Image: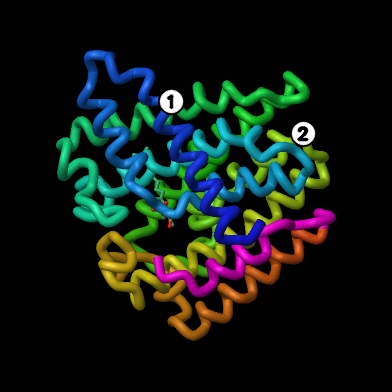
Amino acid sequence: MKFREQTGLYREYVEKFMQDWYARFHDEPQKQLFEAMEYSLLAGGKRLRPIFAFEFCRICGADWQAAAPFAAAVEMIHTYSLIHDDLPSMDNDDLRRGRPTNHKVYGEAMAILAGDSLLTDAFAVAATAQLAQPQDMAFAISVLSECAGSLGMVGGQVLDICSEERECTEEEILNIQSRKTGALINAACVLGVIAAGGTEEQIDAAASFAGALGIAFQIRDDMLDVIGTRDEMGKGVGTDAEKNTFVQLYGLQKCEELVQKYTRVALDALDAFEDPGILPELAASLTDRRN
Ligand code: GRG
C-alpha cells in the first residue's frame, strides 16, 4: 500500500477507535466532561504517534490493528498535554488544531479536568491490548507511564519552565526536548513493537529511531514557529521568541542542517528491520513539514 493510503488508513482507524471508546459513555451525567475531551481529541491533528505505533507493529510482522489500544492511549496523552500546555498558567494560547483552545470553549477548570481524564483513561485503553505474553502488559504500562510522567514529558515541561529565565546550552535543550517531545514519540514506537511481540533488538531500534526523530521533529517545530503561519499551523506562531529553542541557539540555516542530520540518524536505526515499511518516507516527509 502507498504511503498516503497507509497513513490515511491508520488515521481513520485510531479516530474511530477513540470515538467508539467514548461513545459508550454518552449517557453518563458528566456530559460536559466528555464533550470537552472529545472536542480536543477528535479535532484532527496529524496522528503521528498512532501512525508510528501501527507501523512499528506491522513491520514486526503482526496485524497492525493489534497496536490500536496503544496508539489511542498515546494520542490521548498527547492531546491532554496540548490542552494543558495551552492553559493560561502555561502557554496561554487561544488556537490549537485550527480551533479555539479547550479552555476558551469550556473554561479553565473543565479543560484541566478534560486533560486529567484523557491521561487517566489512556491507561484503561492501553490495558485492553491483547498481547502474546501477559507479562508484556506490565512492561508496556511502565513504558507509557515513564515516557509521559516525571521522567519524560512532564519532566521535560518542568525543566523547560525552570530554565525560562536563562540561556540554555545545546545539551540542556536536547535534554529538555528529548523528554518534552521525544518521550511520547518513543512510547508510540516502542509500544508498536511490544504490541507485535517484537524482540529486544527491535525495541532498542525503535527507541533509537524515536530518539533521533523526536529531536528532528522538535527542531522543525521550533523552525515552524518562525517560518510557519497561523493558518498552516492551526495555532499561534511566534510564541517561542523568548524561549530556549534550537532556532534561538543556532538560527534557521543550522537548524535545517540539524533536522537532516537527526533524520539520517533515525533512518540508520531502521536497518534493524528487514522491511522498514513506510517509516523512511514518513521520516523524510517530516523534515519539510508545514504543520
Ligand atoms: C501536567 C500541568 C501538566 C502539564 C503536562 C503540558 C505538558 C505537561 C507538556 C507539554 C508537552 C508539549 C505540548 C510538548 C510539545 C510537543 C509538540 C511538538 C506538540 C505538537 O505535536 P504535533 O505537531 O501536533 O504532533 P498535532 O496537533 O499534529 O497532533
Question: Is residue 183 in view from this perspective?
Answer: no
Judged left or right of residue 90, residue 221 is right
| Above or below, 246 relative to 148 | below
| Above or below, 123 relative to 8 | above
Q: CA distance from mark 2 to mark 1?
A: 24 Å
Judged left or right of residue 271, residue 141 is left
- Disc 2 crowd rating (10 Å Cα; few below 14, some 14-19, many 20+) is some
Name the residue type under label 2: Gly
Which of the two residues, 143 or 4, is positioned nearer the viewer here?
4
Judged left or right of residue 1, residue 17 is left
Question: Mark 2, mark 1: which one is toward the viewer?
Answer: 1
Return the residue at label 1: 21
Which of the two residues, 171 or 180, is positioned nearer the viewer here?
180
Q: Which residue corresponds to the image point at 84% horizontal and 55% vertical from the top-left?
A: 274
Q: Which residue corresponds to the image point at 19% horizontal and 41% vertical from the top-left?
A: 103
Image quarter hosting the C terminus: bottom left
Return the residue at label 2: 197
Q: Which residues are magenta?
A: 272-291
